[in-house]
């Protein structure tokens, strides 16, 4: 069994996922409020996910991906997450 990654490793990747969501949202010219509405979430939840303060449930990642019309995998395609 591989060793458990250190907490900062997880936090760094959670922040990178949030940044990717923010980048895609902005490219679609959506506000956090509009994305939240489309995804069935509240704006504060979207904000916490984008800044890496919250670890989103899979269901919410799927809702966000659907609202942004992207694959959920696109949230993990940030080259800064390597390593």
Image (cartoon, rainbow, N blue to C red):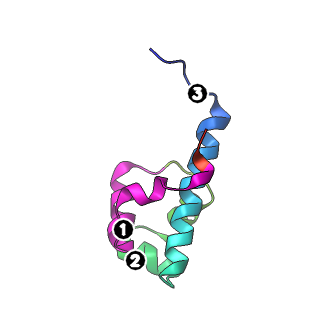
Q: Position of residue 78 (x, y in %)?
A: 55, 56
Asked whether residue 16 is drawn in magenta, I would say no
Give the residue displayed 37% in from the left and 65% down from the top. Answer: 65
The kind of secondary structure element at disc 3 is loop
Extreme right residue here? 8
Task: Return the residue at label 3.
Answer: 5
What is the span of residues highlighted in magenta in the rendered image? 56-80
Task: Return the residue at label 2.
Answer: 37
The kind of secondary structure element at disc 2 is helix
Q: Is residue 1 left or right of residue 13?
A: left
Q: Position of residue 63 (x, y in %)?
A: 34, 63
How many C-alpha atoms fall within 10 Å of the one at disc 1: few (<14), some, or many (≥20)? few
Measured in 3D between alpha carbons, the distance from the residue under mark 3 to the one under mark 1, in whole angstroms, is: 28 Å
Residue 27, relative to residue 73: is it above or below? below
Q: Please identify the quarter of the rendering in which residue 19 is found.
A: bottom right
Measured in 3D between alpha carbons, the distance from the residue under mark 1 to the one under mark 2, in whole angstroms, is: 17 Å
Give the residue displayed 44% in from the left and 73% down from the top. Answer: 36
Disc marking residue 70: 1
Q: Position of residue 30 (x, y in %)?
A: 49, 82
Inspect this view and state whether residue 14 appears: yes
């Amino acid at each position: 069994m591989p060793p458990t990654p250190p907490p900062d490793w997880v936090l760094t990747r959670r922040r990178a996922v949030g940044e990717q969501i923010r980048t895609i949202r902005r490219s679609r010219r959506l506000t956090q409020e509009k994305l939240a509405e489309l995804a069935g979430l509240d704006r504060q939840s979207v904000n916490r996910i984008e800044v890496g303060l919250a670890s989103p449930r899979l269901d919410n990642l799927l809702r966000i991906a659907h609202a942004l019309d992207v694959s959920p995998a696109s949230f993990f395609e940030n080259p800064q997450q390597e390593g």
